[in-house]
Amino acid sequence: MDDYSFFFQNLSYNDLYRFCLKYILRNSLGYFVNQSKFNSLIEIANSKDKRIYEYAQKDANIILSNYFLNMKETKVINIRRIDFLDSEELNLLILSIGAANQYPNFNTDNNKISVSDIFGINGNNILVCKVTGDSMIGANIYAGDTLIVDTSAEPKSEDIVVVNLNDQSFVKRLILKNKNTYLHSENNNIKPYKVKNDDNLVILGVVKHILHSL
């Protein structure tokens, strides 16, 4: 086992995810990456849990797709899977929903299960993301808010969803009408978008909770 493998072998799942995400982003943006170190990281991550690198790759792709988006549109940024939030991040998330008042017996040491219970979503299916832009203000979604997204929910017409459209990710209201799919903004200054046959549309999940920034 080389020095890199020995270092990564002792890291937590969350730390491995963070390193994978960091290295993928740096590599994609053209920064120098020690390839031997990167390969060791991938090997260790996959040996512990193949989801670590798989999720890091998916989340990096979403982050990169938003890099040069027009700020006018409400987009999703800093997407994180709740599986890989550490205790401090989960505690901040809990504070942002006022869990101390709603759940006085909440135990942060058992945070993954408890947070899943609070949101009513299986922990494996929760995406946490920040938003920016003003196209969804009519739905009470503002820049800086945090969205709790259920990736397992079956999207229905009128649902607010997080979508990836042609490699750009947005928050929109889904409208299904006359066999057509529309992405509606909750802002009168922005026209609804009719999804075309040659568009690449992926619905990442349904927004279940909106946590307003303080």
Image (spheres, rainbow, N blue to C red):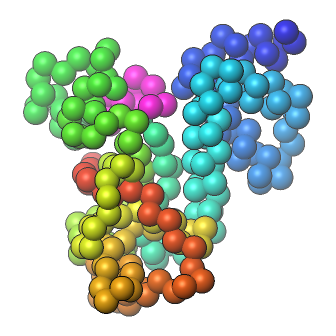
Please name the residue shown 39% across and 67% down the image: 171
User: For the magenta stretch, what is the residue range?
Assistant: 83-93
Residue 3 vertical placement versus 154 (above, below): above
Residue 207 vertical placement versus 158 (above, below): above
Q: Can residue 164 be seen at all in this image of the molecule?
A: yes
Please name the residue shown 39% across and 56% down the image: 205
Image coordinates of residue 155 in percent, x first then y, are 32, 63
Name the dominant secondary structure of the magenta segment: helix
Q: Can residue 75 be seen at all in this image of the molecule?
A: no
Image coordinates of residue 25 in percent, x first then y, are 70, 47
Q: Is residue 1 left or right of residue 101?
A: right
Magenta span contains residue 176:
no
Please name the residue shown 67% across and 25% down the image: 45
Q: Is residue 118 left or right of residue 80?
A: left
Count of marks overlaid on the render: 0
Please name the residue shown 82% across and 30% down the image: 39
Magenta span contains residue 89:
yes
Along the line of sight, the residue nearer the viewer: 167 or 179: 179
Q: Is residue 154 left or right of residue 52?
A: left
The image quadrant of residue 94 is top left
The image quadrant of residue 181 is bottom left
Locate the N terminus by quadrant.
top right
Q: Is residue 1 left or right of residue 95?
A: right
Residue 53 vertical placement versus 162 (above, below): above
